[in-house]
């Protein structure tokens, strides 16, 4: 998927994902005589930031005063300088330039975050060396603003830092169960799965890692990969693409020489599959790319994805990487026709192995159409007209082998 298309889609995704269920819930609450205006659908005071995604995006817009997509140290200092205003913990009443942990927590609470999360992330203040001075136990905004290099972070990088800490916070609490069910009691955690499944954060590595790796063993409720997958598909409004189109999209022949070379494949694995950059594409990472519609995923069926993973993964049970090693051996180059025939044959084997799949599996359902070439079919005309264009046309010869 190209970035242009996905970025123009973003507002739509957010709108359709959030509006319908929210509308129904708001309607239900409106009809309840005891519902108060101050409470939102999550039962907390409504600051207008319904989900942690909303809160983070608003935070990013607030910090990036000149809206250039980067947060300079000056902007950060200006933002931090406003923290704690109007709060009971106002240590800035004397207009000092030191932002304390209490002021930071109060500021994040004002921005809609939970105090539990804010308290957990006070070391945010110490992440900026230029703002560390002996006289201030926190962040010295004046020192930060006056630092010689006005360094900048992209808004997304800074918010990804928040998300990283949030995923760790929620998971650790959920694992230790020290305070019950954090995913039900804390609104930063309860809205994290959907924040990480939708744009603009769904495609950030931290969210891919969280959704498909960290929480991969969770099988119920909001954590089900299938649920997230369905949410993203219905939110995106994209119909499943044709199998042959998806194959063509997988064939990342960057230099257009009709060969998916070893180097091109390795780059593809690094950029699109190995989200935790450990040099090994594990099953969760492979599924994230192949069988979801998220983040440029291909939305292949589970059965085809599984067959493909079994074909590619290490055969050596002692190997350090039990999945797909990102570093490929010599001779891994794939020609366009070989690539298409091999994958089509893999699909044929999967579908023939369980013929009920022709009724239930989105890829198998397409196989007869892909393989059937009759003189009168529109499909044939389509296939023949494109048969000289590499992967699509090669399917025909694959089916007749
Ligand atoms: Ca800026
Ligand atoms: Ca202060
Ligand atoms: Ca190539
Ligand atoms: Ca990996």
Image (cartoon, rainbow, N blue to C red):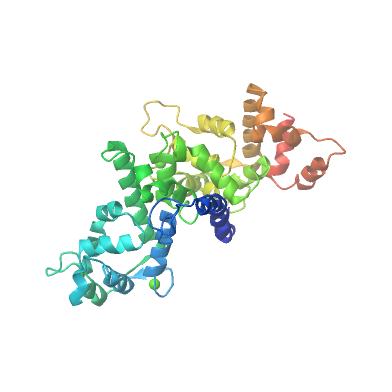
Does residue 297 lie above or below 65 as drawn?
above
Q: Is residue 224 left or right of residue 398?
A: left
- Please say whether residue 96 is visible from this viewpoint: no
Q: Nearer the viewer, residue 213 or 215?
A: 215
Quadrant housing the C terminus = top right
Please name whichever residue, 329 or 211, is drawn nearer the observer in this view of the structure. Answer: 211
Is 213 drawn above or below residue 32 in the view shown?
above
Q: Is residue 125 visible?
A: yes
Percent across and percent down for residue 292 are 54, 42
Residue 50 x/y as whole percent: 44, 56
196 or 255, which is in the foreground?
196
Name the residue furthest front: 33
On screen, residue 186 versus residue 255, left or right, reads left
The residue lying furthest to the right in this view is 376
Number of labels in the image equals 0
Q: Quadrant of residue 356?
A: top right
- Residue at point 37% right, 51% down? 188
Horizontal side of residue 52 vs 376, given as left or right: left
Residue 298, percent across and down? 58, 44
Task: Please determine whether, in this image, residue 91 is positioned above or below residue 310.
Answer: below
Q: Residue at x 40, y 25 (%)?
A: 317
Point out residue 280 in the picture as x, y percentages from the top left corner: 41, 39
Q: Quadrant of residue 293?
A: top right
């Amino acid at each position: 998927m190209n970035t242009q298309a996905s970025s123009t889609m973003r507002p739509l995704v957010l709108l359709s994902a959030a509006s319908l269920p929210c509308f129904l819930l708001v309607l239900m609450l409106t009809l309840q005589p005891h519902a108060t205006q101050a409470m939102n659908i999550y039962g907390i005071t409504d600051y207008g930031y319904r989900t942690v995604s909303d809160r983070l995006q608003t935070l990013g817009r607030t910090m990036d005063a000149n809206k250039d997509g980067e947060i300079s140290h000056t902007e950060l200092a200006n933002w931090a300088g406003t923290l704690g205003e109007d709060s009971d913990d106002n240590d800035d009443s004397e207009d000092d330039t030191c932002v304390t942990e209490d002021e930071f927590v109060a500021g994040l609470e004002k921005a809609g975050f939970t105090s539990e999360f804010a308290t957990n992330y006070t070391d945010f203040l110490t992440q900026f060396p230029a703002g560390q001075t002996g006289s201030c136990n926190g962040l010295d905004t004046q020192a930060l603003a006056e630092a010689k290099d006005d360094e900048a972070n992209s808004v997304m990088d800074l918010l990804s830092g928040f998300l990283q800490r949030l995923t760790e916070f929620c998971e650790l609490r959920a694992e230790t169960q020290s305070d019950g069910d954090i995913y039900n009691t804390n609104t930063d955690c309860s809205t994290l799965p959907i924040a990480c499944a939708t744009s603009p954060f769904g495609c950030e590595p931290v969210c891919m890692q969280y959704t498909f790796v960290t929480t991969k063993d969770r099988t119920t409720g909001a954590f089900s990969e299938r649920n997230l997958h369905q949410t993203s598909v219905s939110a995106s409004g994209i119909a499943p693409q044709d199998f042959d189109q998806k194959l063509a999209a997988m064939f990342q022949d960057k230099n257009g020489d009709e060969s998916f070379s070893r180097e091109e494949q390795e780059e593809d694995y690094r950029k699109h599959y190995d989200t935790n950059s450990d040099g090994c594409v594990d099953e969760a990472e492979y599924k994230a790319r192949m069988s979801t519609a998220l983040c440029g995923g291909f939305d292949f069926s589970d059965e085809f994805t599984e067959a493909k993973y079994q074909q590619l993964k290490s055969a050596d049970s002692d190997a350090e990487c039990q999945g797909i090693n990102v570093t490929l051996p010599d001779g891994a180059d794939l020609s366009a026709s070989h690539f298409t025939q091999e994958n089509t044959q893999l699909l044929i084997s999967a579908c023939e192995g369980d013929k009920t799949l022709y009724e239930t599996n989105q890829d198998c359902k397409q196989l007869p159409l892909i393989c059937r070439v009759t003189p009168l079919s529109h499909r044939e005309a389509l296939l023949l007209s494109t048969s000289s264009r590499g992967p699509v046309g090669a399917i025909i010869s694959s089916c007749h082998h």
